[in-house]
Amino acid sequence: MRVVVIGSELAAATAAAALSWVGHDVVWRPHISSDWETLSTSAWLASEPHLRSHLEEGRHQGKLSILQPDEPIPPSAPCDVLWLALSPEQRSEAGDLVAGAVPCLSESAVLVNNSTFPVGETEALEAQLGGSGRRNAVALADLLEEGRAWEAFTRPSRWLFGCDDDRAEHQVRELLRAFNRRREVFQRMPRRAAELSKLAINGMLATRISYMNEIAGLADSLGVDVEQVRLGMGADTRIGYEYLYPGCGFGGPNFSRDLMRLADVQSASGRHSALLDQVLDINEHKKETLFRKLWAHYHGCLEGRTVAIWGAAFKPGTARIDHAPVLTLLRALWAQGVHVRLHDPAALEALRDAVGEHPLLTCIEGDPIEATEGADALMLVTEWKAYWNPDWQRLASQLAGRLLLDGRNIYDPRYVASMGLHYRGIGRRADP
């Protein structure tokens, strides 16, 4: 098939690479906010396993063409599929972008809306297609995970597929046939149901995380190890272990935006969600958890102290810091005059772009232990694998304040305490 992909999101880059990899002729036109020259040097693209190499492979083999954002789509054979993967903030442009691509579409083309837009937006975009009713729009929920986007697209556990037309379903199934070989992964439902399902999924996951964070706070107050509570809850088959890990807040360009989008849908329907508001409030509150533990340990005397931070990315495996807890944490620390020595394997460039050259920030590249030299405390914010098993003796000798604040509960409190360090996790603690 001949496919046109529009957008600069991870979903657009992955679709362009994967579809050209399996033999489709793909034309990718990035959004004007981020052309290929910008994307090709971005840290988030470089940190996605296999993605950059498959994009280059597609171009080398002539299966993938990457246009400038304002470059017209070549008027060759009519396109069978228009794949739209925009950010929620670009929703207002979607109609014009679709209308602009109409001249290159075949009479029976299908629009695949892979963007996370409000419920009903796929139907509205279909109206831009023309074609005497033979062109259809379908909703394909963006279920990619940062750090494993290629695997999630090429070996999907499922496609959440919103479609109201059998012919359009057949065409999309053919488009994605190479990724539907192991077992049936299409879960078809009406378009509006798929759009709401995507938002509802992230709402449920966020609610589980926020509820677990509330339980961790209660455990702290009662002197209970929240890990025991997590194991007890997870063993109940009605609940399970997924997303029951307490931490210092979630972030990310998709998760956070989807929650806000779901809140917008609730508000527009006239059904205000107090629960969703509370989930969002809990998450923002939890982003300051490590700061409050630091404050309590030093009895509010923080000015002039130095804190080491391990991790800035919103999750391991990505270079993005969108809505990441570290941003809230840095603001709180700097307001108290705390100097921060920060290490991250991939996100330092994004952090510098976000906060600039702040006088109270030193970015450390190379060995994470270097960030702890002379620090009054170490805060673990992102659970990169490089942080799981540090040289504990060296860490204990360099960390002047002997305080470890574990924002992801990845360490064994008793072991950390046996190394002579004070351990404070989320709902867990131990002293030497």
Image (cartoon, grey):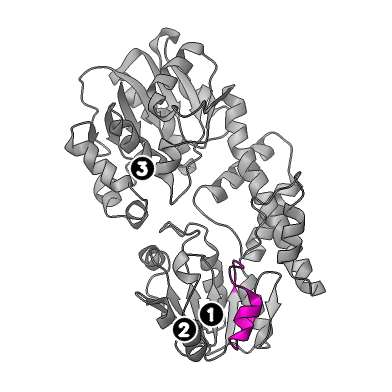
Q: Position of residue 346 (x, y in %)?
A: 38, 63
| Residue kind at label 3, given as amino acid type | Ser
Q: Residue at x 52, y 84 (%)?
A: 338
User: Which residue occupies the foreground of this view, 96 or 303?
Assistant: 303
Q: How far is disc 2 from disc 3 in space, using C-alphas?
A: 37 Å
Residue 370 drawn at (x, y percent):
40, 82
Residue receiving disc 2: 372
* Residue range (magenta): 406-424
Question: Helix, strand, or loop for circle 2?
Answer: helix
Q: Is residue 416 visible?
A: yes
Q: Is residue 23 left or right of residue 93?
A: left
Determine which quarter of the picture holds residue 120.
top right
Which mark identifies residue 296?
A: none
Cβ atoms at labels 2 and 1 below 8 Å apart: yes
Q: Is residue 71 above or below residue 297?
A: above
Q: Earlier in the sequence, mark 2 or mark 3?
A: 3
Which amino acid type is marked by label 2?
Thr
**Where in the figure is residue 192, as x and y percent of width and height?**
60, 26
- Within 10 angstroms of label 1, few (less than 14), some, or many (20 or more) residues? many
Query: x, y (%) of residue 12?
Result: 37, 38
- Magenta includes 409? yes
Left/right placement of residue 335 relative to residue 177 reads right
- Mark whose residue sits in front, 1 or 3: 1
The residue tagged 1 is 378
Quadrant containing the C terminus is bottom right
Few, some or many C-alpha atoms within 10 Å of disc 3 (few <14, some 14-19, many ≥20)? many
Q: Mark 1: which amino acid?
A: Leu
Image disc number at residue 8: 3
Q: Nearer the viewer, residue 374 or 28?
A: 374
Q: Residue at x 55, y 56 (%)?
A: 251
